[in-house]
Amino acid sequence: MKLLEGKTALVTGASKGIGRMIAQKFAEHGANVAFTYLSSVEKGEALEQELQAYGTKVKGYRSDASKFDEAEKLITDIVAEFGTLNIVVNNAGITKDGLLMRMTEENWDDVMNVNLKSIFNVTKAASKIMMKNRAGVFINISSVVGVQGNAGQANYAASKAGIIGFSKSIAKELGSRNIRANVVAPGFIRTEMTDVLDPKVVEGWTAGIPLKRGGETTEVADACVFLASDMATYITGQVLAVDGGML
């Protein structure tokens, strides 16, 4: 059963990790997929090729969502190419970890711009299309760190907590137009980023997770498919933790 048949979705930051898997699962479920990438050009182009296999329309865009003008142009280009936009997954994000005492202003600003301002930019532009359609779905990717904080990640935690407050507000503002906004908060998910960590460190983390393992990107993507689909038409303003019970 294809849950997103005929829908057009945008996934930001989709060249690797969770974003890549979300784009793949959406295409599997029949969605036309627009996605963005920034630095990983080869990976972005490879993903566009790969997703053609599912038989839906797929196009990658090199775009920096943290820049307001680029986000506006992106949405305009997608609507010109695909005809409309039904679902937006704001996934683009970076980390620049460090204790507060050593955190530079630049490290704070960069993480805020990419993780939080980008969501304002893309949501503002895309909501205009959805308001005309009187329908739409936003799924914003936060983190368990945004809910409970984490030493050495004050900038990242603040940006991910900001996503939650923003999404809950948007859910209230746009609900009357049948536009839903929810948050997915992944816990410790196995990606290219975690594969380089010391196995001992990973063991220490997984010991504290009730399900005793890290999550897979497919498990986060499945939650996004559900929230994007008509199975979740009465769910908005919620934070869904996909974390093996960490929270």
Image: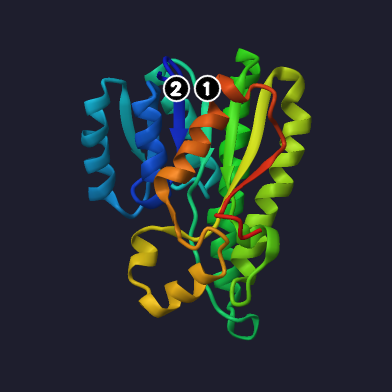
Between 176 and 63, the one lying in front of the other is: 176
Q: Position of residue 190 (x, y in %)?
A: 40, 59
Structural distance between the alpha carbons of marks 1 and 2: 5 Å
Image quadrant holding the N terminus, namely top left
Between 136 and 70, the one lying in front of the other is: 136
* Rendered position, 9 above or below 215: above
Q: Which mark is residue 8?
A: 2
* Rendered position, 169 above or below 201: above
**Amino acid of disc 1:** Asn
Q: Which mark is residue 86?
A: 1
**Amino acid of disc 2:** Thr
Q: Residue furthest front?
A: 211
Whether tag 1 and tag 2 are in contact, CB under 8 A, the answer is yes
In the picture provided, is 137 more to the left or to the right than 202?
A: right
Mark toward the start of the polypeptide (1 vs 2): 2
Question: Quadrant of the rendered structure where residue 83 is?
Answer: top left
* Rendered position, 154 above or below 9: below
- Mark 1 crowdedness (10 Å alpha carbons): few <14, some 14-19, many ≥20: many
Q: Residue at x 26, y 48 (%)?
A: 43
Q: Residue at x 27, y 32 (%)?
A: 51
Q: Residue at x 55, y 62 (%)?
A: 111
Q: Position of residue 102 (x, y in %)?
A: 59, 85
Q: Position of residue 75 (x, y in %)?
A: 49, 30
Image quadrant holding the C terminus, namely bottom right
- Mark 2 crowdedness (10 Å alpha carbons): few <14, some 14-19, many ≥20: many
| SS category of the residue bearing label 1 | loop
Q: Residue at x 64, y 64 (%)?
A: 157
Evaluate whether residue 11 shows in this view: yes
